[in-house]
Image (cartoon, rainbow, N blue to C red):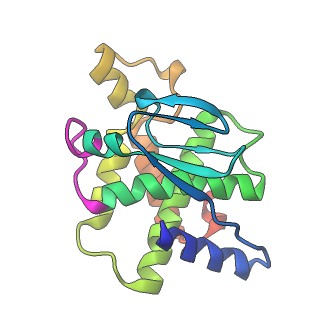
């Protein structure tokens, strides 16, 4: 979370803006937020009403377990995606588009965070980006629907397909700038 704050603070400053950090709430199973009650089925989420990132720790167990997206950078991708929603809120980008567009833009912003973290801190190791891409693919609507109901209904997607989510992250990573995602 601190790495996301460093990256977004710096990028906002370069654009003459002030980055207000989101608050972090860790929970397991269920939580009350400014957006209402959330259960385990919700997983990690961002609530624009209280500008908090809610991380369900049991989701990370599921991500590395049954969803098969292992590694610390898989987890970091999820956190960066949720912080991406905070960035959208601060920039007023989250109100006019459909949910799939908003979610893919948050994936793109997670890619920007990864690229900026690599450039400024040199902490990304071989395989980290593959872990993030594996997590993006693991939580694609097509993969989750196929797993839970045995078939895919593209018209009901809320976050985008695995391929779309991977592509959005790659676009942000390749561009490395906020403009890559607008």
Q: Using the image as rendered, state which of residue 32 and residue 176 is in the foreground.
A: 32
| Quadrant, the C terminus | bottom right
Vertical relation: 144 (above or below) 77 = above
Please state if 35 lies on the left or on the right of 145 as rendered: right
Task: Read off the magenta span.
Answer: 63-72
Please state if 136 lies on the left or on the right of 65 as rendered: right
Q: In the picture, residue 152 is in which quadrant?
A: top left
Q: Using the image as rendered, state which of residue 46 and residue 138 is in the foreground.
A: 46
Answer whether residue 68 is magenta in the image: yes
Vertical relation: 119 (above or below) 179 = below
Vertical relation: 153 (above or below) 14 = above
Q: Position of residue 153 (x, y in %)?
A: 44, 17
Determine if residue 20 is in view: yes
Question: Could you tell me which residue is drawn at 66 percent across and 35 percent down?
Answer: 35
Q: In the picture, residue 63 is in which quadrant?
A: top left
Q: Position of residue 123 (x, y in %)?
A: 34, 80
Question: Could you tell me which residue is drawn at 36 percent across and 22 percent down?
Answer: 145
Answer whether residue 157 is magenta in the image: no
Question: Could you tell me which residue is drawn at 49 percent across and 35 percent down?
Answer: 160
Vertical relation: 147 (above or below) 99 = above
Please state if 40 lies on the left or on the right of 52 as rendered: left
């Amino acid at each position: 979370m601190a790495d996301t704050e460093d990256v977004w603070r710096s990028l906002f400053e370069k654009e003459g803006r002030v980055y207000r950090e989101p608050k972090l709430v860790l929970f397991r199973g269920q939580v009350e937020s400014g957006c209402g009650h959330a259960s385990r089925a919700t997983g990690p989420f961002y609530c624009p009403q209280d500008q908090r990132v809610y991380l369900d720790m049991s989701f990370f167990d599921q991500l590395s377990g049954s969803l098969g997206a292992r590694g610390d950078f898989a987890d970091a991708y999820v956190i960066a995606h949720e912080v991406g929603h905070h960035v959208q809120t601060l920039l007023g980008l989250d109100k006019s588009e459909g949910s799939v567009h908003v979610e893919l833009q948050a994936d793109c912003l997670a890619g920007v965070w990864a690229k900026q973290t690599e450039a400024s801190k040199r902490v990304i190791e071989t395989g980290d980006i593959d872990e993030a891409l594996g997590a993006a693919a693991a939580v694609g609507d097509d993969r989750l629907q196929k797993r839970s109901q045995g078939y895919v209904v593209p018209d009901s997607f809320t976050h985008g397909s695995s391929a779309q989510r991977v592509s959005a992250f790659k676009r942000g990573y390749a561009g490395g700038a906020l403009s890559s995602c607008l």
